[in-house]
Image (cartoon, rainbow, N blue to C red):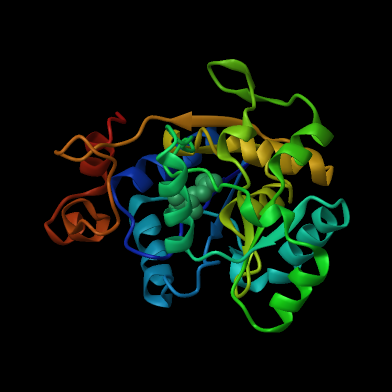
Amino acid sequence: MPPVFRFAPSPNGYLHLGHALSALLNAAAARAAGGRLLLRIEDIDLARCRPGFEAAIYEDLAWLGIGWEQPVRRQSEHFDDYRAALARLEAMGLVYPSFESRAGIAALVEERERQGPWPRDPDGAPLYPGTARDIAPDERSRRIAAGESYALRLDMAKAVRRAGALAWDEAGRGTVAADPSAWGDVILARKDTPASYHLAVTVDDALGVTDVVRGEDLFPSTSVHRLLQSLLGLPAPRYRHHRLILGSDGRKLSKSTAATALRQLRAEGLTPADIRRMVGLD
Ligand code: GLU
């Protein structure tokens, strides 16, 4: 079976040089291995994604000389798949609703921090304090029925106990031990959003993707994906996390900076060969 790669951008802004590196590495790896390249549009967050950005993804990739298989998988068309995966985790007793707003959580964490440092996740956000874990089942149902907003969270300690020790295969590094506990009780879905990034990416990569090539910023998230794969009985792809392209300020590129957007560079007259050089290929 030929290996299957995927490039999975979110249409919430224009692709930048970092996306170009990721897409070019995926295309080159697929070509070298006689494999396939899939394109997935990660548009779960309907409030931030725009059809215009999706059209621009196709245009920018084609301009770079990248070809992908049809059909493109658009996550917003597969909410039922994510709901089904969530239902399986719920049936295992691993999911609970939390009702605090973001500001409410920040206030809770601030209170805990008065007693000493509070743990942060690998992205630097404070871990959810787990306050809603102990809400009684009837009260949960009552609050949901009353229309309160909520996030559905994974009971991380319980999930890790069930899954046991996990690892993944990382190109150039061999076997890496997963550490999902570093993320605390991650969000799997929200009242109006049937899946978080972690849940959707896990379900979608299990549809035949054998090789995930993506930026180093997602390396820590792989621990959560590995855990969800194990709980849901899904296969684990091989992973390769590549270097990031940094801006002149030394920070990871942002979709909101026009200067490094591919379409801006194209409008300035740069060619695909220039882009390859700028991202350190060739
Ligand atoms: N949609 C994610 C992004 O644009 C990438 C997800 C992934 O490659 O796993 O950053």
Q: Is residue 40 above or below residue 194?
A: above
Q: Position of residue 147 (x, y in %)?
A: 65, 83
Q: From where the camera sits, is residue 147 visible?
A: yes
Residue at position x 74%, y 51% in the image: 207
* Camera-nearest residue between 119 and 228: 119
Q: Position of residue 80 (x, y in %)?
A: 75, 70
Query: Is residue 193 shown left or right of residue 94?
Result: left
Q: Position of residue 116 (x, y in %)?
A: 43, 32
* Camera-nearest residue between 92 and 78: 92
Quadrant where the C terminus lies? top left
* Camera-nearest residue between 155 and 67: 155
Query: Is residue 267 shown left or right of residue 8?
Result: left
Residue extending farthest to the front is 115
Q: Is residue 146 above or below residue 118?
A: below
Residue at position x 25%, y 37% in the image: 246
Q: From where the camera sits, is residue 33 visible?
A: no
Classify residue 239 by image quadrant: top right
Query: Is residue 231 shown left or right of residue 49?
Result: right
* Camera-nearest residue between 44 and 14: 44
Q: Is residue 18 above or below residue 90?
A: above
Quadrant where the N terminus lies? top right
Residue extending farthest to the left is 268
Residue at position x 49%, y 31% in the image: 241
Residue extending farthest to the bottom is 146
Classify residue 138 by image quadrant: bottom right
Q: Is residue 206 above or below residue 263?
A: above
Residue at position x 24%, y 38% in the image: 251
